[in-house]
Structure formats: structure tokens, C-alpha cells
Image: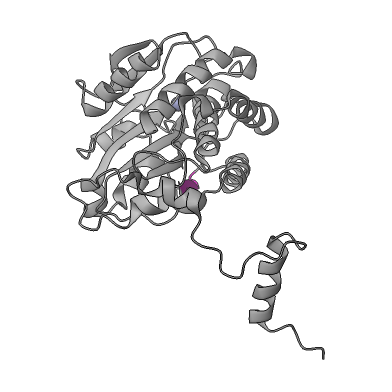
């Protein structure tokens, strides 16, 4: 059997391949001037951060995320794929798991590491249609390890629909903006580490609190340190209709909604404040005392029906929400 090339030699060969073969560079290239010039922009680490040498130095070489980095075409492609190619996708169904596999590929391609969290969803009646019990899944995407005691941001969107709706607006629109943000953040620095979550089984399976199963399962597994360090959670839910962006909280305004409104003004995105209980996944966080808000909820004709199609989605509204979110994350 032929011996494989020893690993060290492979490394040497690969390293050689990376350079221009003709150029025999001086044996010891000094430290890269461009990097050393830009690296120590050293935003003074937050007061609570005990080790200032960790996170900022690894992120420093990346340029900051810009409000103009978000591609509406990416968001709209997701709307078309989920609503036209996959269609109705209640959280426990085979269609839902196909949607999850597709979304996972998009996140991975944009450089994110994706973890799957499985959780049970009960049988019930979803918007007038009987549904069976079954497992569903949350997709949790991160960009490497993050210290649970350090501040972090969470952006979520539910990937499921009610049984009768292809769900272009509810909620392929939110998933689309989330995926466009994931792509925009590739190689870009944000003000804090970001976790993106696509939630399963948000839609109701009965009256009252019989909903939001994915986000409840996600919150329930958060440790005490992560709860304390979560600076803000934003749920993107129905963000492709209208020309003003609703900023919604479960009860009165909070730090998250106030910050979103402030950033929106700076980014020239019109918003309207709303208070509404039991409306989306941010409620699962708010109920546990965690800081959370929602973007979206403009009423539309196709709501929870077969008429919730991509033709009802306004690219300009997707762009407003993408711009607002990038401005908030940067
Ligand atoms: Zn929804």
C-alpha cells in the first residue's frame, strides 16, 4: 500500500501553493503592515468584560456591518422558495423539515454554525384545521463560541405556518430578512455577538397559550448566565407588507423597542409603536423577564390563508426592515 504524504509535508506543500510560485519572497516576511495598522482600534472592552484581549482582537480586522449590506434579493428568494416550492409547513410536518434543511444550508453557506434543537409539539387545532402531535426543530446559528457571561443579541423568525397557508408574509418574510442578515454579516463585525434562531411551531394549536412552542423550548434551555447577558431579542414576524415598520412589545415600551425606534429614525425607516400580547416569539422571552420586541404585523388580506403568496410581498418593506436591523446590529 502506498504511503500517504506525511501531514507536515502536506502543510508545507499547501503553504507553498498559496504563494506565487515565481516569487521567492524573503524568508521571513515581517508582520503584515495592513493588519497591524488597523487591528488595535481597541474599542475599550465593556466594563463587565474581565479579559479585554479576547473577542475584540479576533473581530477587529473585519469591517463593520453596514446598513446597505443587506440584499433584498436574498430575502425575496427565500420568500419564493418557502411559499412556492415548499408551501404550508406546520412545525411537525415533513414540509417543515424540508424548509429547515434548506434554511440550514443557507446559513451554513453564509459561514454560520448551525445547531438543531428538537422539541415536542402537541396535537391540536391550528386555525381551524386539526393537526397531529410530533417533534419540531429550532435552528440555532452562531459564529463560533461566545462567552455566556458576555452581552449578546438574538434575532429570531418562525419558519412554520398554519396548515392552510403557504406563508409568504407569515413568515417567509421574516425568515428571508434573517437569512439576508446572515449573509450580510459574513465577514462583517457587529457591536455584540449575534445568535440567529429559526423557530419551529410558533403558530397556534389551540386557544390561549397553545403556541410559540419553539421559542418556549429555546428559552427553557438558556442558562442563568446567558439569560442575564442577553441584551436584546428581536422577532421578525410578518415584515414584508406595508410601508411603516411596526415595533411591537408585549406590554409597555422597553429598552429594545426604544433602541429600535431610535436606530430607525437615524436610518430613515418609518416605524409605529404597538403593544400586543401573545403575538409572536418575543413573548416567550418577555414572559421570562428577558428584553424582547417584535418587528412586523401590518394587517393584510392573505393572512393565514391560501392567499398568503409572494405576490403580496413588497420588496421595499423587506428592505426597510433589513436596513433597520443592520443599523441596530452594527
Ligand atoms: Zn407569524
Quarter holding the N terminus? bottom right
Residue drawn at the location 55% of the way across and 28% of the way down: 172
- Horizontal and vertical percent position of residue 272: 33, 11
In the image, farthest residue toward the front: 26
Quarter holding the C terminus? top left
In the image, farthest residue toward the bottom: 1
- Horizontal and vertical percent position of residue 149: 24, 53
Taking depth in this image into account, of 156 and 34 the one nearest to the observer is 34
* Span of residues in magenta: 133-141
Residue 321, located in which quarter of the rendered image? top left
In the image, is residue 135 part of the stretch drawn in magenta? Answer: yes
Seen in the image, is 307 located left or right of residue 300? Answer: right
Residue 273 can be seen, yes or no: yes
Q: Is residue 1 above or below residue 259?
A: below
- Horizontal and vertical percent position of residue 196: 44, 41
Taking depth in this image into account, of 318 and 296 the one nearest to the observer is 318
Residue 262, located in which quarter of the rendered image? top left
Amino acid at each position: 500500500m502506498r504511503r500517504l504524504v506525511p501531514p507536515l509535508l502536506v502543510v508545507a506543500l499547501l503553504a507553498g501553493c498559496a504563494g506565487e510560485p515565481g516569487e521567492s519572497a524573503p524568508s521571513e516576511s515581517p508582520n503584515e503592515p495592513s493588519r497591524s495598522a488597523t487591528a488595535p482600534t481597541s474599542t475599550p472592552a465593556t466594563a463587565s468584560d474581565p479579559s479585554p484581549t479576547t473577542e475584540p482582537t479576533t473581530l477587529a480586522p473585519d469591517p463593520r456591518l453596514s446598513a446597505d449590506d443587506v440584499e433584498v434579493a436574498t430575502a425575496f428568494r427565500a420568500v419564493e422558495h418557502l411559499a412556492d416550492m415548499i408551501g404550508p409547513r406546520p412545525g411537525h410536518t415533513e414540509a417543515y423539515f424540508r424548509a429547515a434543511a434548506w434554511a440550514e444550508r443557507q446559513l451554513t453557506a453564509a459561514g454560520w454554525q448551525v445547531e438543531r434543537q428538537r422539541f415536542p409539539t402537541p396535537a391540536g387545532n391550528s386555525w381551524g384545521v386539526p393537526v397531529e402531535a410530533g417533534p419540531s426543530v429550532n435552528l440555532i446559528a452562531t459564529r463560533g463560541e461566545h462567552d455566556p457571561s458576555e452581552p449578546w443579541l438574538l434575532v429570531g423568525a418562525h419558519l412554520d405556518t398554519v396548515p392552510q397557508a403557504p406563508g409568504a408574509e407569515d413568515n417567509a418574510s421574516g425568515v428571508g430578512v434573517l437569512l439576508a442578515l446572515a449573509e450580510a454579516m459574513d465577514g462583517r463585525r457587529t457591536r455584540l455577538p449575534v445568535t440567529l434562531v429559526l423557530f419551529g411551531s410558533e403558530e397556534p394549536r389551540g386557544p390561549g397559550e397553545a403556541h410559540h412552542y419553539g421559542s418556549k423550548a429555546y428559552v427553557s434551555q438558556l442558562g442563568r448566565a446567558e439569560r442575564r447577558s442577553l441584551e436584546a431579542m428581536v422577532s421578525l414576524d410578518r415584515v414584508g407588507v406595508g410601508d411603516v415598520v411596526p415595533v411591537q412589545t408585549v406590554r409597555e415600551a422597553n429598552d429594545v423597542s426604544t433602541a429600535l425606534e431610535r436606530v430607525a429614525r437615524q436610518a430613515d425607516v418609518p416605524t409605529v409603536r404597538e403593544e400586543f400580547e401573545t403575538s409572536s416569539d418575543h413573548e416567550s422571552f418577555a414572559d421570562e423577564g428577558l428584553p424582547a420586541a417584535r418587528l412586523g404585523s401590518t394587517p393584510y388580506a392573505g393572512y393565514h390563508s391560501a392567499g398568503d403568496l409572494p405576490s403580496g410581498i413588497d420588496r421595499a418593506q423587506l428592505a426597510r426592515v433589513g436596513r433597520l436591523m443592520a443599523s441596530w446590529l452594527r
